[in-house]
């Protein structure tokens, strides 16, 4: 509920009930994992056996501003225009 | 340590609304603040790294460009875009770690999820439980060590401009405009331990950190351009009791503001405690105009950010060889430069002259004057006083300044005359001190001539002399002044003083 509020998701009671059931099912599955003895298993940070993948510090031209802003819901003065960041809740 | 209760009373007055008004007057140097409270400060400093490109994409990292001209699919979080780590950014982060005496360790990247529009992906890539640099310290010029808990890599966010409503503040604005040029710029966040006890120590920490970052080429560290930003965690407690609830102060845009904000916030918390109120953990916004901090938002829990490992990046694990290569390429740090100059001059490493000369990068030059046979102590004073505009490699040949210091040390010219000669040398970008001194008629008066002149001064200034003999030491000034005038500035003031003292005793 807290994350939904932070994300400004307007959830109706039916959705809340359905989502709660689904999340409960997922948490039960984690409980199954908790029941296993995994003391000797290393956490898997990545599926790939790779470290240190880099690019060099060289500038490559990016995207055109006019094209990008044309795809945005709203733009003004070369910038993306968005609704007020604080205060919608109240 | 004395308790400064007078400050406490002076700092609080009643506002028109009946609420407390706090002034941010100086409490500098008092480790124990008002009524036995002790200030506890930890600093989080964000620095933008001096790379050409962003942390995870090849758009330019450049301040001041037209909005949204340095953007690409990774910056904008477009579907399918994948981040690739900038090797040079990692190297600069390693330099910072080494300069701050940290351990460089294998590290990972996490997603920090949140809901502001300044990151189009709705998360910032940062380092969480395995940062690249841990457990270091920064030594203040006076020697105190401030612990550095971690210095980790992360990406900067876009720049929001809040418009309409109440003039530029995030609260009450009608809408915001976003520029993503800064989004994805490499940052290192340097988190200190809560070892700072005064606003002055906080200022020293940030000043020293900035000097180090510039010296190692990691950042231009300009607070006014936002390439170095500082948040302060401030709490108060009575020594021997647990630390109080802390508030995080944001929007501190200069080293001066940092000191003011910490002093204000400490007073606010102490006065709340004194009034029986509870300090809430929250983020507060420093307002430079009214000199106060204001509630911005309640502090998020780490849970709210739902950190998880960034699946699009592999771990970072610099090899021993790479770390050693970075270490070998490190320049001498400001602290080591001050120590070297301190040893050469037998002056304290945090003395003003040494601080100033090292900050200007002129310490190599001072030592070159010594190598050229000059007096290093006089060279330090002259460089500090007269070389402010000459940069790290002054045009004046070191041998010329060496010659001047030798004339002084030999007593051939006085300190006052040396300044005059030096002004000519600086103006001309060099010159033979002895020749310039001679052309001005500066030559040492022999002792006999000097004594005769002092006797004449005494005869001509009988009233002042009588007062001086009667124990009025202030009268000495008039006598020395008269001697300098009579000798047209050639007399050595110290010698004149010594002669007058000897004659009074005789």
Image (cartoon, rainbow, N blue to C red):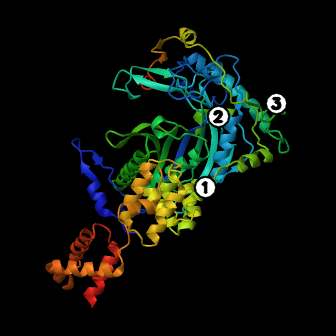
Q: Looking at the picture, how far across and down is residue B3, in whole percent? A: 36, 66
The residue labelled by disc 1 is: B137
Q: How many discs mark residues in the rendered view?
A: 3
| Residue B487 or residue B355, whichever sits in front | B487
Residue at position x 31%, y 63% in the image: B5
**Numbered disc 2: secondary structure:** loop
The residue labelled by disc 3 is: A47
**Numbered disc 3: secondary structure:** loop
Q: Which mark is residue B307?
A: 2
Badge 2 local density, few (<14 within 10 Å), some, or many (20+)?
A: many
Callouts 2 and 1 in the same chain: yes
Q: Looking at the picture, how far across and down is residue B272, in whole percent? A: 36, 51
Q: Looking at the picture, how far across and down is residue B255, in whole percent? A: 44, 46
Q: What distance separates the C-alpha of mark 3 from that of mark 1?
A: 36 Å
In the figure, is residue B494 to the left or right of B86?
left
Q: What distance separates the C-alpha of mark 3 from that of mark 2?
A: 19 Å
| Residue B121 or residue B480, whichever sits in front | B480
């Amino acid at each position: 509920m807290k994350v939904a509020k932070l994300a400004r998701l307007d959830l109706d009671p039916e959705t809340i009930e359905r989502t709660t059931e689904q999340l409960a099912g997922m948490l039960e599955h984690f409980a199954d994992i908790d029941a296993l003895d995994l003391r000797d298993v290393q956490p898997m940070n990545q599926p790939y056996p790779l470290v240190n993948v880099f690019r060099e510090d060289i500038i490559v031209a990016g995207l055109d501003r006019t094209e990008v802003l044309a795809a945005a819901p709203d733009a003004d003065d070369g910038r993306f225009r968005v609704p007020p960041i604080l205060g919608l809740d109240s | 340590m004395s308790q400064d209760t007078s400050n406490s009373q002076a700092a609080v007055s009643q506002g028109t609304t009946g609420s407390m008004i706090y002034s941010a007057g100086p409490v500098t140097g008092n480790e124990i603040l008002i009524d036995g409270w002790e200030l506890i400060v930890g600093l989080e400093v964000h620095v933008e790294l001096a790379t050409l490109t962003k942390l995870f994409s090849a758009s330019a990292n450049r301040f001041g460009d037209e909005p949204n001209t340095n953007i690409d699919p990774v910056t904008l979080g477009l579907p399918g875009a994948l981040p690739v780590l900038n090797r040079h950014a990692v190297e600069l982060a390693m330099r910072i770690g080494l300069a701050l005496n940290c351990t460089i360790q294998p590290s990972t990247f996490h997603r920090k999820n949140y809901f502001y529009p300044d990151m189009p992906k709705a998360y910032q890539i940062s380092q969480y439980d395995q940062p690249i640099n841990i457990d270091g310290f920064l030594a203040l010029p006076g020697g105190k060590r401030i612990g550095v808990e971690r210095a980790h890599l992360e990406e900067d966010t876009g720049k929001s401009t809040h418009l309409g409503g109440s003039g530029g503040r995030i609260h009450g604005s009608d809408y915001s405009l976003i520029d993503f040029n800064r989004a994805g710029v490499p940052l290192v966040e340097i988190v200190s331990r809560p070892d700072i006890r005064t606003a002055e120590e906080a200022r020293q920490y940030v000043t020293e950190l900035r000097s180090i970052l510039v010296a190692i080429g990691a950042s231009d560290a300009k607070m006014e351009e936002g390439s170095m930003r500082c948040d302060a965690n401030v709490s108060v407690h009575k020594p021997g009791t647990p630390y109080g609830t802390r508030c995080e102060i944001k929007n501190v845009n200069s080293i001066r503001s940092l000191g003011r904000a910490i002093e204000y916030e400490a007073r606010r918390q102490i006065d709340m405690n004194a009034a029986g109120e509870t300090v809430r953990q929250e983020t507060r916004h420093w307002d430079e105009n009214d000199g106060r901090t204001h509630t911005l938002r309640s502090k998020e829990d780490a849970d709210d950010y739902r950190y998880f490992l960034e699946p699009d990046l592999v771990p970072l694990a610099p090899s021993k060889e790479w770390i050693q290569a970075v270490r070998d390429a490190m320049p001498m740090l400001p602290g080591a430069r001050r120590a070297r100059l301190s040893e050469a001059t037998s002056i304290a490493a945090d003395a003003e002259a040494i601080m100033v000369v090292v900050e200007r990068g002129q310490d190599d030059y001072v030592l070159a004057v010594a190598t050229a046979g000059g007096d290093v102590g006089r060279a330090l004073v002259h460089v500090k006083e007269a070389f402010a505009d000459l940069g790290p490699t002054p045009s004046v040949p070191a041998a010329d300044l060496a010659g001047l210091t030798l004339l002084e040390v030999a007593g051939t010219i006085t300190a006052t005359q040396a300044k005059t000669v030096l002004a000519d040398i600086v103006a001309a970008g060099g010159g033979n001190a002895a020749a310039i001194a001679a052309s001005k008629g500066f030559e040492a008066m022999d002792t006999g001539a000097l004594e005769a002149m002092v006797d004449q001064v005494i005869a001509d200034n009988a009233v002042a002399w009588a007062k001086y003999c009667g124990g009025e030491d202030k009268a000495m000034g008039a006598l020395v002044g008269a001697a300098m005038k009579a000798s047209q500035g050639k007399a050595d003031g110290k010698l004149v003083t010594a002669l007058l003292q000897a004659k009074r005793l005789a």
